[in-house]
Image (tube, rainbow, N blue to C red):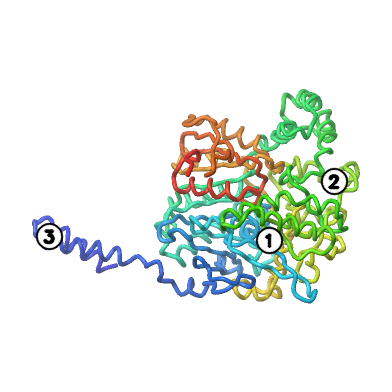
């Protein structure tokens, strides 16, 4: 560093004297500055130790480098956050770095890695000789690391593979979650200094609608306060994200009536009784409250994350329901067939045959298109809407996040692990699938407590991430030390201590010039698009490009988009649920790529 400044001072002196030697010394200064930056293939010792060289279940060479390990965010308390990093397959030297966060609060970002836009698709296949099942990994054609360097972070400590040696750390708030994630990022960029100059984005979904803007603000404050290294943040993305209790709380009835899930006459009566559509702050026991509870009871048995899709339930096998699960698997198989050059009809027939086999109890595996869609899954029908509603009321959960109609409010916030504990075994859900014999889709399991959101099949992730070979391969602590990986954690007690995110979004965009993409799967009932569309439109930002369709490459409408001033874009994804990259992977990748490449979503390529 001293040598660098000495040369700089000498160059200034020589320039003042007009010497030809100045040009030589100036060039030497510029060369020294370039050489001071680490080359892409030069790893720090910490990064080299985190490099992943193989993964159980994947038989091929990695298309790009992968890393996994821990970053300590509080050494005195032993608080460590686990990350998984996948380099871009396009241009890792110049492509953006993107952090991904799943929500909950308290749900693992391996949800996004395994089931949404990670580098692999996961499926359960039978071992020879009836020895249970194993997890098979294949390359994901819609992985976001096709075009970006992706970091998946388990946050806060106590979630996924992240942990603390101090149990009191599992009582956590929005404030500490953002502070720890900011500390993680600065330590991560020290570990991977070759990425410090790349554009950086933060992304996430669901309760990450709180995580993401808060972390963006924390990064901006840290940069302005001189925290090192500075982070080159340029924008962020939020999918179906919690934002504001009024907008989120008023979104459910308009969504439900718009999808014909509520009767129009009942909706108009509700609207009139609730102050013209102010449902979010209804008084308990009021006419508005009673009418909404009556109408909402008809929504309780739906898949809250995607009202178009079936609800996965472990428990008693119901072949008639299993047999109807082929549609989504067929769509996914046909799409993959087109990409790989195979006949779509062949792939669709294969998916259909697999589902038919599962219905007869003779399945050979699960479809790789999702969490068991079209594979051998055991499902059961809810006993009755009235019974479910009564149990929710008894547990104090009716209209409580994360159930349908629930709103995130200041104070304690639940996730599905907490909900399952309150409901006991009623919903017919099961503990993490950590034994290959118990994961066998043909073997119904005894219903008990679960850490998995209702309607969600996480068996592949359960089995893979609790495999000792996988833990060792990705440099994660063993189950003996930190316990089983679960999709959502009941270790943490989470307190929301920040209010509405709307002022934070205004500060991040209008105040600091960042770009933001707020997107919604338009069939999500957990955080309906009606709320996100309303608050983005009410910010008062000028409209740069009015509401219009956007398309994927074959001229199919992918959704609708409106562009506002100050770098804000709001988009819907047609037919998508809460986890857009899972239900609509092609549209999600197209949207993501266009946004990080600085293109309009309406550009079609």
Q: Position of residue 302 (x, y in %)?
A: 79, 44
- Report which residue position mark 1 lands on: 170
Quarter of the rendering containing residue 44: bottom left
Mark-to-mark CA distance, 1 and 3: 60 Å
Nearest to the eye among marks 1 and 3: give it: 3
Return the mark for residue 392: 2
Q: Residue at x 45, y 58 (%)?
A: 90
Q: Residues within 10 Å of mark 1 (few under 14, many from 20)?
A: many
- Tell me if I can see residue 384 in this picture: yes
Circle 3 residue: 14
Verify CB contact (< 8 Å) between mark 1 and mark 3: no
Please indicate whether residue 251 sits to the left or right of residue 421 in the image. left
Disc 1 and disc 2 in contact, CB within 8 angstroms: no
Point out the tag, 2 or 3, that comes first from the N-terminus: 3
**Quarter location, residue 179:** bottom right
Establish if 128 lies above or below 487. Answer: below
Q: Whole-Å distance between the Cαs marked 2 and 3?
A: 79 Å
Mark in the foreground, 2 or 3: 2
Image quadrant occupied by the N terminus = bottom left
Q: Where is residue 290 in the image (x, y as percent from the top left)?
A: 85, 32
Image-based side of 83 in relation to 312, left or right: left
> Which is in the foreground here, disc 1 or disc 2?
2
How many numbered badges does the structure rendering display? 3
Q: Position of residue 408 (x, y in %)?
A: 69, 44
Q: Distance between the residues labelled 1 and 2?
A: 26 Å
Mark earlier in primary sequence (1, 3): 3
- Which of the two residues, 288 or 576, is positioned nearer the viewer here? 576
**Crowding at mark 2 (Cα within 10 Å: few <14, some 14-19, many 20+):** many
């Amino acid at each position: 560093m001293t040598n660098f400044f000495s040369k700089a001072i000498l160059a200034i002196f020589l320039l003042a004297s007009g010497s030809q030697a100045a040009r030589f010394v100036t060039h030497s200064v510029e060369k020294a500055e370039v050489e001071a930056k680490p080359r892409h293939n030069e790893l720090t010792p910490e990064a080299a130790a985190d490099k992943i060289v193989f993964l159980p279940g994947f038989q091929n060479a990695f298309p790009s480098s992968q890393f996994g390990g821990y970053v300590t965010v509080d050494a005195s308390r032993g608080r460590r956050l686990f990350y998984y990093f996948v380099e871009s397959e396009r241009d890792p030297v110049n492509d953006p770095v993107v952090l991904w966060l799943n929500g909950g609060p308290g749900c693992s970002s391996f949800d996004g890695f395994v089931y949404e836009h990670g580098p692999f698709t996961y499926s359960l296949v039978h071992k020879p000789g009836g020895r249970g099942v194993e997890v098979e990994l294949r390359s994901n054609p819609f992985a976001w690391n096709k075009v970006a360097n992706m970091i998946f972070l388990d946050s806060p400590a106590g979630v996924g593979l992240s942990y603390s040696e101090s149990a009191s750390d599992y009582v956590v708030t929005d404030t500490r979650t953002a502070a720890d994630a900011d500390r993680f990022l600065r330590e991560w960029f020290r570990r991977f200094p070759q990425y410090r100059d790349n554009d950086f984005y933060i992304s996430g979904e669901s309760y990450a609608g709180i995580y993401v803007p808060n972390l963006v603000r924390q990064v901006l404050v840290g940069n302005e306060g001189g925290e090192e290294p500075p982070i080159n943040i340029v924008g962020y993305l939020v999918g179906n994200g919690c934002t504001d209790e009024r907008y989120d709380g008023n979104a459910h009835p308009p969504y439900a009536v718009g999808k014909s899930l509520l009767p129009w006459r009942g909706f108009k009566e509700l609207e009139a009784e609730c102050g013209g559509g102010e449902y979010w702050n209804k008084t308990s026991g009021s006419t508005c409250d009673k009418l909404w509870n009556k109408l909402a009871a008809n929504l309780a048995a739906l898949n809250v994350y995607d009202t178009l899709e079936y609800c996965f339930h472990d428990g008693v096998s119901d072949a008639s329901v299993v047999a109807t699960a082929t549609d989504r698997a067929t769509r996914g198989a046909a799409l993959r067939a087109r990409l790989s050059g195979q006949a779509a009809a062949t792939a669709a027939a294969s998916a259909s045959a697999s589902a038919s086999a599962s219905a007869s109890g003779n399945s050979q595996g699960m479809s790789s298109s999702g969490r068991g869609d079209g594979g051998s899954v055991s499902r059961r029908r809810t006993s009755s809407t009235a019974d479910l509603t009564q149990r929710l009321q008894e547990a104090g959960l009716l209209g409580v996040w994360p159930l349908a109609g629930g709103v995130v409010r200041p104070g304690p916030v639940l996730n599905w692990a907490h909900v399952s504990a309150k409901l006991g075994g009623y919903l017919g859900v099961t503990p993490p699938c950590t034994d290959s014999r118990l994961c066998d889709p043909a073997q119904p399991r005894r219903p008990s407590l679960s850490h998995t959101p209702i309607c969600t099949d996480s068996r592949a992730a359960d089995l893979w991430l609790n495999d000792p070979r996988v833990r060792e391969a990705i440099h994660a602590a063993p189950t003996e030390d930190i316990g089983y990986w679960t999709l959502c954690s009941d270790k943490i007690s989470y307190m929301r201590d920040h209010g509405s995110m709307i002022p934070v979004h205004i500060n991040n965009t209008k105040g600091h010039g960042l770009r933001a993409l707020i997107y919604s799967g338009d069939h999500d009932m957990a955080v309906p698009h009606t709320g996100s569309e309303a608050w983005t439109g009410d910010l008062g930002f000028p409209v740069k490009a009015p509401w219009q369709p956007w398309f994927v490459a074959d001229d199919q409408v992918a959704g609708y988009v409106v562009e506002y001033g100050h770098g804000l874009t709001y988009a819907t994804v047609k037919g998508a649920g809460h986890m857009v990259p899972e239900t609509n992977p092609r549209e999600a990748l197209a949207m993501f790529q266009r946004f990080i490449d600085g293109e309009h979503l309406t550009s079609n390529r």
